[in-house]
Image (tube, grey):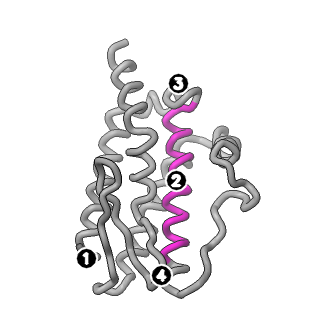
Amino acid sequence: MNKSDLLIWLREENQQWEALLEKIGLERMETGGVVGFWSIKDVIAHLTPDHQRAISRIRAAKRGEAEPPPPWPAHLTADDDINAWIYNENHMRPFQDILEESQQAFQQLLDTVEALPDDVDTTVEQQGDRETYFVCFADRKVRPGEFFDHFHEDHESGMLAWLSQAENQ
């Protein structure tokens, strides 16, 4: 695999994500019950820091710098605490702002990967039934598709089940 393959994969993943959001429709974006009491808007806000984190990790690794701090307060380490913080920071924000932030973060991720040298070391690893893509820098591997991996691993099946139920009502 090379940088070009990685960019193709990222774009394809994003197209599938955008197609799912289009299928869900604007009128359902703030309806709760998708993941627990979360809405689709809440899930998007929950996933967006994965793009932001991948960007900062790639940039830091490229420069040989230490692991950057997360986009949430560094003292939060438990998933439930991080998720609660992200929810509380975003739940009252307008959907359009959440969506635009997510789309901008994806574009920044693409720009960051495109700015890497063409011969950057990339690799693919099988993780469960999916392939996970990495960019490698000396002794560090960074997952540029962290957003999509997280979505597929933890939220896709629930979102699709919720959508199916919503479509049948």
Q: Which amino acid type corresponds to the residue marked 4 in the rendered image? A: Asp
Tell me the SS state at disc 4. loop
Between residue 59 and residue 129, name the one nearer to us: 129
Range shown magenta:
38-58
Identify whether 63 is placed above or below 103.
Answer: below
Tell me the SS state at disc 1. loop
For the residues bearing labels 2 and 1, Cβ distance under 8 angstroms:
no
For marks 3 and 2, the one nearer the N-term is 3
Q: Residues within 10 Å of mark 3 (few under 14, many from 20)?
A: few
Q: Residues within 10 Å of mark 1 (few under 14, many from 20)?
A: some
- Give the x, y percent position of residue 2: 25, 76
For marks 1 and 3, the one nearer the N-term is 1
96 on left or right of 163: right
Q: Which residue is mark 1?
A: 2
For marks 4 and 1, the one nearer the N-term is 1
Q: Measure the C-alpha gap from mark 4 to mark 1.
A: 18 Å
Identify whether 45 is placed above or below 108.
Answer: above
100 on left or right of 116: right
For the residues bearing labels 3 and 4, Cβ distance under 8 angstroms:
no
Tag nearer the camera, 4 or 1: 4
For marks 3 and 4, the one nearer the N-term is 3
For the residues bearing labels 3 and 2, Cβ distance under 8 angstroms:
no
Residue drawn 50% across and 70% down?
Answer: 55
Q: Measure the C-alpha gap from mark 3 to mark 4.
A: 41 Å
Q: Which residue is mark 2?
A: 48
Which label was assigned to residue 139?
4
Q: Residues within 10 Å of mark 2 (few under 14, many from 20)?
A: many
Q: Residues within 10 Å of mark 4 (few under 14, many from 20)?
A: few
- Give the x, y percent position of residue 142: 45, 70
Identify whether 152 is placed above or below 161.
Answer: below
Q: Which residue is mark 3?
A: 33
